[in-house]
Structure formats: C-alpha cells, structure tokens
Amino acid sequence: MIVMHAGSGLIEKLLDPASLYTAASFFILATLITVIATFYSLYIKNKKTLFKNRIKEHIDQWIIQIISEEESEIKVPARFRKLLKNASARQVAIDELISSKRTFLGSVADNIVQLFYQLGLHEESTKKLDDSQPHIQCQGIHELCTMEQRHLLQKIYRYTNSKDPDVRIEAQSAMVKWYGFNGLRFLDIVSYPITAFQQLKLLELLRNEDFKEIPKLGKWLSSKNVSVIQFALKLAEHYRQHQVSAEAAHCLYHTDEAVRMQAIKTLATIGYNSTAGLYNMSYNADKIQFQVNEDVYLQVKSIAV
C-alpha cells in the first residue's frame, strides 16, 4: 500500500499543471532553437553560395572579354579589388582562374595568367607554401604550377625532397610540367623513395615532351637512393638509352632485387652486345640471390638474343 501511494504521488506530481507547463515550455524552446539554428545554417550557406556565384560572374565576364577582345591590359574595377580583400573571395577567384586556364590555350591562357598575377592572387598561393599543413602546401604548389609562376622555381624545387610524400609528388610533378626532361634534376638531391605510382606519373608527364638528352642518367644509375636507380633504369628502357648499357649492366649485381629485375628488363629492351653473357653469368652464379623465375628468365633472355 505504501508503494502504491508513493507511485500515485509521483504521477500526481508529473501531471501537475505547473510541471506540464515547464516541460512543454522546454520542448517548445528546444524546438525553436533547433529551427533557428537550421534556418541560420541555411542562410549562411546560401549567402556563401551567392557570394561565390558573384565572384564567378565577374571572372566569367573577364574571360569572355579576354576571348572576344584579347586585350593586352585587363582592367580590374576598384569594387572588385575591394571584394578580393576577403580570403574566401580570393580562393574562389583562384579556383575559377585555374579552371579556365585548363580550358583555354594560347593568348587566352596567357591573359588568364596575367589576370591571376594582376589580382595579386599569386601572393595568396605563395603563402600556402609556408603553411604547416601538407595539403595546403600541395594546393599552393598546384596553383602556382598551373598558373605558370616559374619565378618561384627555387622555392618549389626545395619541396621535391619534402618529408611529406604528397608534397614531394606535387613538387616533382611541377618541375617536370615546367621543364620536361630538364625538370628531372631533382633526382640529384631526392633522398626519400620515389614510389612506383610517382614513377609512372612522371613517365606519363614526359610522354608529352619532346625528348632531350639526359646527361645525368648514368649518374642516377649509381645513386644511393634505390628508387632513383629504378626510375633511371625505366627512363633508359623507355627511351632506349644505349649509352648507359654498361651502367645498367652493373645494376644486375645490385643488392636490391627490384633493381636487378628492372636492369634485366632494361638491358633486354635497349640491347647490349654482352647482354646474354651477363644474364648467364649473373643467373648461374647465384640463382637464390636473384630469385628470377625460370620462365621469366628464359623469356627475357630470348628477347635479348
């Protein structure tokens, strides 16, 4: 009976008008706050979208002007310069110009680069190189590379040996995009591994370049960086650099198995008057060390012969 009385007392307390009013007020207030927060979030998002579209509209107008008139001097209204004092606006402008730069060639692309510089956006991208966050550094390198800011060569070149792999890839790619085969000079200094993916990417970038002699190829084949040797061997194979046959043959005795295997492929492609003898000597001397499958060995040997 005591328990029932206590329970009924609790129910009566909960059903008390004052308690019900308090609970209802709490739920109404919570709902109101949620609705206000939702509408405010949508307002801010919509405001940002409108702001971004406003920047795009200005950029698009200039691009049309550049295409139709190809003026040597691009006039930037004072009100737009004032607008670009906003960091978000500057980034939107950078993104739009980069997108346009990829679309157009010739004098139009040159004028887009001029506009990028004239708006002072190169300074915004340059600041990103000194950021502590690797993804921001990558963004800066990409923007400066796309917009042909080659006067920053030395600054970006240092990042080709960055401790962060993504930053290294971006900087190394920028060097090759700018200078083709001459851009491979970072192979002289890089101490971190060049991944297999990055090696393929660099070869793909070079595919669009007119071939130029690679005087340091022999030097790279004796690099202390194993991945540099692997990439140098791939360069020798892809571009049939017969002049480094002796250096490539020396790689058959390298301690790294991947280097030895690539050396066999390279020698089989570029041809070497002592290739077959080198295969026999190295293969029979230490089959366990080389760990080359018999079928693969015979196939490569037949190509060489």
Image (cartoon, rainbow, N blue to C red):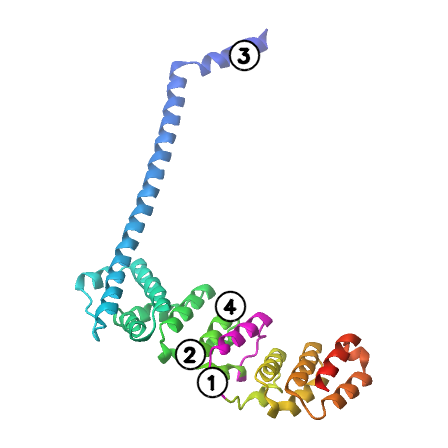
Mark 3 vs mark 2: give the one in front. Answer: 2
Q: Viewed as shown, does residue 149 lie left or right of 240?
A: left
- Amino acid, disc 1: Asn
Q: What residue is pinned by disc 4?
A: 166
* Alpha carbon distance from label 3 to label 1: 89 Å
* Alpha carbon distance from label 4 to label 3: 68 Å
Q: Earlier in the sequence, mark 3 or mark 2?
A: 3
Q: Secondary structure at mark 1?
A: helix
The count of marks equals 4
Q: What residue is pinned by disc 3?
A: 6
- Amino acid, disc 3: Ala
Q: Is residue 69 above or below residue 289?
A: above
Q: Is residue 225 magenta?
A: no
Residue at (50, 14) in percent of width and height: 10
Q: Which mark is residue 178?
A: 2
Residue at (49, 87) in percent of width and height: 212
Q: Viewed as shown, does residue 127 lie left or right of 175?
A: left
Mark 3 vs mark 1: give the one in front. Answer: 1
Q: Is residue 277 above or below residue 202?
A: below
Q: Earlier in the sequence, mark 2 or mark 4?
A: 4
What segment carries the magenta color? 188-212
Q: What residue is pinned by disc 1?
A: 182
Q: Secondary structure at mark 2?
A: helix
Mark 2 vs mark 4: give the one in front. Answer: 2
Q: Quadrant of residue 53?
A: bottom left
Q: Is residue 211 magenta?
A: yes
- Amino acid, disc 2: Trp
Q: Earlier in the sequence, mark 4 or mark 3?
A: 3
Which residue is at the front of the view, 24 or 141? 141
Q: Secondary structure at mark 4?
A: helix
Q: Viewed as shown, does residue 156 lie left or right of 93?
A: right
- Amino acid, disc 4: Asp
